[in-house]
Amino acid sequence: MGVGITVEHLNAFYGKTQALWDINLIVQANHATALIGPSGCGKSTFIRCLNRMHETIPEARVEGFVRIGDLSVYNGTSPTQLRRRVGMVFQKANPFPTMSIYENVAAGLKLNGFGNRKQLDEIVEKSLRGAALFDEVKDSLHKKSGASLSGGQQQRLCIARALAVQPEVLLMDEPCSALDPISTGKIEELIFQLKEQYTIVIVTHNMQQAARVAEFTGFFLLGKMIEFDKTEKVFTNPSDKRTEDYVTGRFG
Amino acid sequence: MSSNLAVIPQIVVPPISWRRRATDRLMTGVAVLTVILVLLPLFAIFAYLVYKGIGSINLAFLTQTPKPVGEPGGGMANAIVGSMVILGIASLMGVPLGIGAGVFLSEYGRNRYGDAVRFVSDVMNGVPSIVIGIVAYGLVVLRQKHFSALAGGVALAIMMVPTIARTTEQMLLLVPQSIREAALGLGVSRWRTTLSITLRTATSGIITGVMLAFARVAGETAPLLFTAFGNQFWNKDINQPTAALSLQIFTYAISPFDEWHRQAWAGALVLIVLIVSAVAAVRLAVRHGKLAGA
């Protein structure tokens, strides 16, 4: 089951440059929340703060309070422990190139010391089905490298890999930006199904996508969150002038 | 409707001028020529070695120890085995150290400490091999009070480390950051990511670096002169003076005997064949484990 996320007074920095300013929001469990805004506004930085990937960049740091379910993210939780419960799908599909399709999906569990072969087989199949990829790859699970798949399949493989660790939250950083409309459609459909089991936070440049998949939408501008509300409200009746300008295409 | 279709303007493609065609041919020719020039010395050396050495290679050469001066026959079996032993010792010590240093440089060394290590390893790459022999002499031979295969192995290992460290670093840096992030994002710890993901992704490049270092030290003579020292007899103890092909070639080549000269040529041929087959075997083994589309 998914869990909710609470963010309070979050500030993020790259060295001396501040990238996020006092972000506050609440993400509902088992819903999809979209983050929109022009390039460089801090959306990606923000979701990377949720699973502590931000701090893997040299000199990057975070201030503030984040709670995911019962975990206080920046207090008493180790990054590895956290990331097993908060999966991430990146902008560009990044399967492990030397591993087979099966190994890619099993990687998260195997590298964390999970070795039960039979259960692993089950989880891999379930995760690939969950990512709507199983039927396309079932005959070459062990034969083909993850990198030999098409772009859309690779991205679904990465989703399967994230699901295999059985997280509660799934962070998606522009998961469709490198995909054609058909693959994008498949992934959006997938997000719909995944919502039943996971909490989803998705960064997107595509406002139609946000409107299609997410119940809640946050609008970021220059490192600040300008507006956060129900998706319908953000797109049809935003309370901030800047949000309106952005969603109607007047700038950005 | 169809009559309303816009008329597609005819684009007249001018014929490729004779000058462009001539330049194209000329440049292709130059490229082919440089390839030939680069490969020529290699083939020339190999052909000459075969021509000079093949006549002296026979079963005795590969299975017997050297005969005393004046007696015909005998072989370099002890030197062939000795070379393998010394190279084995060198690889056992040098490869893990070199790869470890490369991992440090690429994953943790983007700072002043890393720069210092990089500088030192580049300098070490330029140190004459005989000087490294002296270092091993001081480190091992003086302490053990006698020459040994171990001392020779230490000398060659010292030579391997900087090459392996720097190529490993370069190969790890070629692994995209996104691959590391993928593993970290699954909750895999940093050292596990480095070991199971980053190193594994860069394996084939790292092996190239290792083979390069191996091939380079396999023919080294100077660092072995006062470490392994050489031996005319069989020796099974790595703490005793040990024969090596390069040393044997050196001794025989500067001797005044025709028979020894012929054997030196044969030894050189055997050495090159051994190095080439070792590198080829490793390459084949690596290719064998590859997946489709990888």
Image (cartoon, coloured by chain):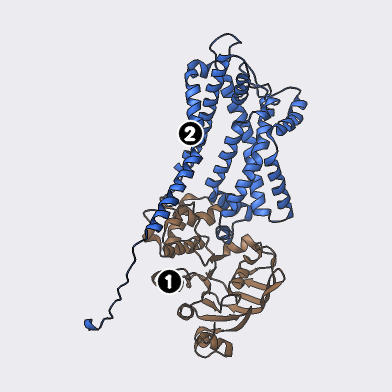
Chain colours: A brown, B blue
Is residue B265 depicted above or below A2 in this figure? above
Residue A22 at what x, y percent from top left? 68, 79
Mark 2 = which residue?
B43
Residue A60 at what x, y percent from top left? 68, 67
Mark 1 = which residue?
A184
- Residue at far front of view: B19
Q: Quadrant of residue B68?
A: top right
Residue at (53%, 60%) from the top-left corner? A165
Q: Are marks 2 and 1 on the same chain?
A: no
Residue B250 at what x, y percent from top left? 62, 23
Would residue B76 be visible to someone looking at this image? no
In the rendered image, the quadrant that contains the C terminus of chain A is: bottom right
Q: CA distance from mark 2 to mark 1?
A: 55 Å
Query: A122 left or right of A79?
Result: left
| Amino acid under disc 2 | Phe
Is residue B134 depicted above or below A43 in this figure? above
Is residue A120 depicted above or below A51 in this figure? above
Discs 2, 1 touching: Cβ within 8 Å: no
| Amino acid under disc 1 | Thr
In what element is the residue under mark 1? helix
Residue at (71%, 68%) from the top-left corner? A15
Is residue B261 depicted above or below A124 in this figure? above
